[in-house]
Image: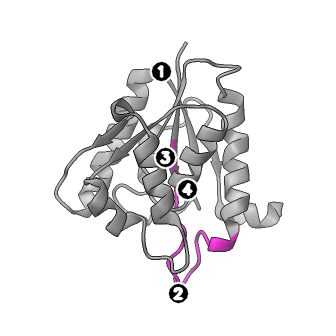
Amino acid sequence: MPVSILFSGHMIDNPGRPKPRFPRELEAAAAARIAAAIAPYAPVAMPSTMGFASCARGGDILFHEQCRVAHVPTMIILPFPPEVFIQKSVVGIPGSDWERRFWQLWNTTPDAQRETMNLPQSDDAYGACNIRLLARAREHGAVHLIALWDGKRGDGPGGTADLVTRAGTANKPDIFSPASLTRAQ
C-alpha cells in the first residue's frame, strides 16, 4: 500500500525574533529528528513511499534533504512561483545558504513532483497550499504526518498548526517541538 509522509514545520527564526521558536542553533538537531521520523517509511520497508511538503527555510527544506538521504522521493508544492516564494519564505537569514539549498532541491526534483499553484500573494495562499499538500498526499496513499511544531495555534492560515489540524490524528502523527530538540541535545 502506498504511503505518504506529509510534513509541516516551522521556519528558522528571523534574526531578532522577540520570542524564539526555531532558533538557527537547532538546525542539526532538527535534521536528525526529522531523519529518525522518516526512517520507518524508507523504501526498503515501504517501496511506495513519497514525501510531501512545501520548501520554506527550516523544517521544509530539512525534510526534503533528509528524504533524499533516505531515498524517499518527494513532492514540492509552492503557493507562488519559486522566485516569489523565495523572497517570502526562504531568504532573510544573513550568512545562511537556504536559498542555494532551495534551488538545489527545486532543480533536482522531477517536474512531475513539483507544483507551483501561482496564487495571488496573500496569507490565505499558504492555507490553500496546505489544502493542496494534504489532497496530493491523500491521493498517493495512507498519510503519516510529521510536524516540527511548537504546539501553538497562533501562526495563522497556512502555518504548521493549520496543516496539523487539517491532517488530523488518525495515523498517529509524529509531532515534536523545537523545545524538545533542546532537551535532546
Q: Amino acid at mark 1?
A: Gly
In the figure, 104 relative to 98: above or below? above
Of callouts 1 and 2, the N-terminal one: 2
- Viewer-side residue, 122 vs 85: 85
The quarter of the image holding the C terminus is: bottom right
Asked if the residue under mark 4 is in contact with the one under mark 3, i.e. CB atoms within 8 Å, the reply is no
Q: Quadrant of the N terminus?
A: top right
**Residue under circle 3?**
164
For residue 12, side relative to residue 128 (left or right): right
Q: Secondary structure at mark 3?
A: helix
Label at residue 141: 1
What segment is highlighted magenta in the picture?
Answer: 7-25
* Farthest-out residue, left: 120
Name the residue nearer the viewer: 98 or 185.
98
Q: The residue tagged with tag 2: helix, strand or loop?
A: loop
> In this rendering, which labeled residue sits more in front, label 3 or label 2?
2
- Whether residue 20 is in magenta: the answer is yes
Q: Amino acid at mark 2?
A: Gly
Is residue 89 depicted above or below 168 in this figure?
below
Disc 2: which residue: 16
In three-dimensional space, the C-alpha distance between marks 1 and 4, rounded to whole angstroms, equals 22 Å
- Which numbered tag is attached to residue 59? 4
Which of the two discs, 1 and 3, labels the residue nearer the N terminus?
1
